[in-house]
Each structure stands twice: as C-alpha cells, then as structure tokens.
Amino acid sequence: MSETVWINRSDLTDMMVNEEASALLPENAVRLRIDSFSVTANNVTYAVAGDGFGYWNFFPAGEGYGVVPMWGHATVEASNHPELAIGERVYGYLPMGTHLDIMPGKVTPGGFIDAAAHRQPMSPIYNQYSRLAADPEHDPAKEKERMIFAPLFKTGWLIEYMLRSNDWFGAQNLVMTSASSKTSMGLASCAAQSSPHIRRIGMTSSGNVEFVKATGLYDAVMAYDDVAALPQTESISVDFAGNSALLANIHRTLGDHLKYSCLVGATHVDARGGAGGGTRDITNPAPILFFAPDHAVAAIKELGPKAFGEAVAKSWHTFLSAVEGGVTMEERSGLLEAINAFQAIYKNTADPSVGIVVRP
C-alpha cells in the first residue's frame, strides 16, 4: 500500500491523501520507500509553474490533480534490478508521498537515472538519483540541510554564475526580493564568495527584516515599503517573490539604473497577477525568466562535470557554515504535516527561520 498527496491543479489550496495498492514491480524496476523530504518555497514554485514547465508530468495523478515534486532521501524497499540491493539509500526527486517505483538506467557506483518513458521529455537534472554510499556531497549529519537548502542553493549558484559570466551587466548592486527565502540566501552567499565587489541588497517584508539581517549574507536589508529608497546606482534585480506590483516599483525606482531584471520562482503567489507573474507590461529592461535546469546543463557543458561539481561543492560548504544555527531544523511526521507545511508557504504564513523536513 502506498500514499501520495494529490493537489487540485486549478486550486492549490485543495490537497488530499490518495491511497492505493502497490502495483506488481516490473523487471529491472525498483521500489523506493521515501524516508524524508523537505517542504520549501521551491515546492510551491513547482506547483505554481506545474503546467508551464511540466512539473506535473514527473509523478502522474488522477484527472485534474497533480503531485508536487520534493527533494529527499529514500531507501530501496524492493528491487528487480541486479545492481541495486534492498536497503540501499538514495537522494533525489521524489513525490510528496510514501513510495516511488522507478526504472533505473545508466547505473554507476555514484548514481543512476529514472529511465521511465514518461520522464524522458523533462530536464535530465530532475531524473538523476545519487547513491549515498558513494556520494561525495552526502554527510549523514547534514541530511536535513541538504534537503532544505541544496536544490535552492544550486539555483542561487547558477544565477550568480550567469551574472558573473555576463560581467554583471555593468551593475554594482544586486537587489534581491524575498531575501528570507533559501534561494535568495544562496545567491547572496555565492555573490559574496565569487563577486565581493557587488553590493548585495536584500528586500523582504517588514516582519522578516531582523531575520534577514541576522543571516549576515546581505550588505543592506530593506523592507518592501522602502523600495523608493533603493540607491540610484547601476543595479540588477533578481525577483524571487513573484509580486508584480513590487517588481514594477523596483523598475520605476531604479529606472535607467536597472541593467538586468531576472525572474526566479514565486514566494508571494497571491500577488503574481496572472500566470506569467503579471510582468508583461514591465519593461526597460523586460524581466527574463531564469530556468535553472537549462542553465545547469549549459554550465556543466562549459566547465565539465568534474569542475562544475567541485565549484558547487566548494560554495555549498561555505554557505552551510554561514547559515549554521540561523535556521531551526524541524522534523514532522506524516503526509498531513506535509500538506500543512506546503499550505503555510503557499499562503505566505510560514516562518522563514524554520526549515521543515517531513518523514511520511
């Protein structure tokens, strides 16, 4: 028997636990028992952009419903594959649920992909699973941190790499909305490490200002209400909030000083103003959507897999040291707790100082 959370694709406040009998495991297939996964703003973005970017296609659900993808750890519960034994643990892309059947392909000592036909049209980044016994990024003492921060941190790393590769478009300031979010914190850390000459300005709601200041990742922290006080200096905007009115205010305030406008995710879903974030009327410069998987493939091609992995790992360990103690790790049990955590983030009522890990 397995359980999976289904979400109404036309009403993301409507979620239910679907229970069904486990199917017969095909030849060469593996059944994973999901040990734990994190619930972050990243998962909300997957749901909000589910139709546009194919996120609903990874873990099919009933008509009109979808399954939100998560990042987490799992154990091989049953195996018909000669190279994967019962009891082995892996890390990767999982459903919000208790089990996942996969068809391992390209198996190496370090990992494999899910070669199931329905997953092949999507980015290969999401189809890869790490085998923890031979995974250099795995630290048994930091499993919670990896689930909560790593996918978001890697997006931040990729944004910084893209901006640095373009000489920061001639800007001196980096303005980040939703500065309390894990992705914004990751970008701020990577910019501090690799581009210390760029001034990092974090924008957040008034209630989160003190938390964001306490991270020490930003040179300046401003409340959204103070957007008019942004310095009139050549700047880049990276919008994680998805609040079209806020982004329009940033554009108006900075005017010709704004050299590049980047859209990433959506943490303030209620203010998106439409499926595209309500940004079509914002120009000079027009906001450009950042799709991390495409940039990851390009960076790996440019740097080579080994150098890419080493660069990300080096920045990752520095970031972990910077945020240690700043976010409380909270472990919850059961899929109903996963639903509650998702809804709190979706409705923008979650505490940014708490990282949620669920054991289904």
Image: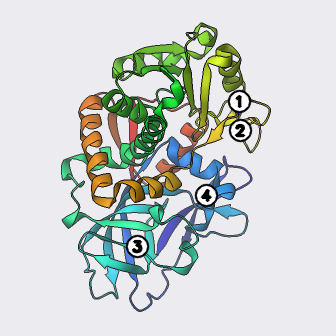
Q: How is the image coloured?
A: rainbow
Look at the picture and state if 81 lies above or below 188: below
Q: Say which residue label 4 marks.
A: 16
- Can you give x and y, in whole percent of width and height, for residue 229 in the image? 59, 7
Q: Earlier in the sequence, mark 4 or mark 1?
A: 4
Eye-nearest disc, 4 or 1: 1
Dots 2, 1 in contact, CB < 8 A:
yes
Q: Earlier in the sequence, mark 2 or mark 4?
A: 4
As measured in the structure, the alpha-carbon distance from the residue carrying label 2 to the one carrying label 1 is 6 Å
Image mark for residue 244: 1
As measured in the structure, the alpha-carbon distance from the residue carrying label 4 to the one carrying label 3 is 29 Å
Estimate how packed mark 3 is, as few (under 14), some (14 to 19) or many (20 or more) residues with alpha carbons within 10 Å: many
Residue at point 44%, 61% (across, down): 93
SS for tag 2? loop
> Mark 2 belongs to which amino acid?
Gly
SS for tag 1? helix
As measured in the structure, the alpha-carbon distance from the residue carrying label 2 to the one carrying label 4 is 27 Å
Q: Earlier in the sequence, mark 2 or mark 1?
A: 1
As measured in the structure, the alpha-carbon distance from the residue carrying label 4 to the one carrying label 1 is 30 Å
- Can you give x and y, in whole percent of width and height, for residue 35 in the image? 34, 61
> Mark 1 belongs to which amino acid?
Ser
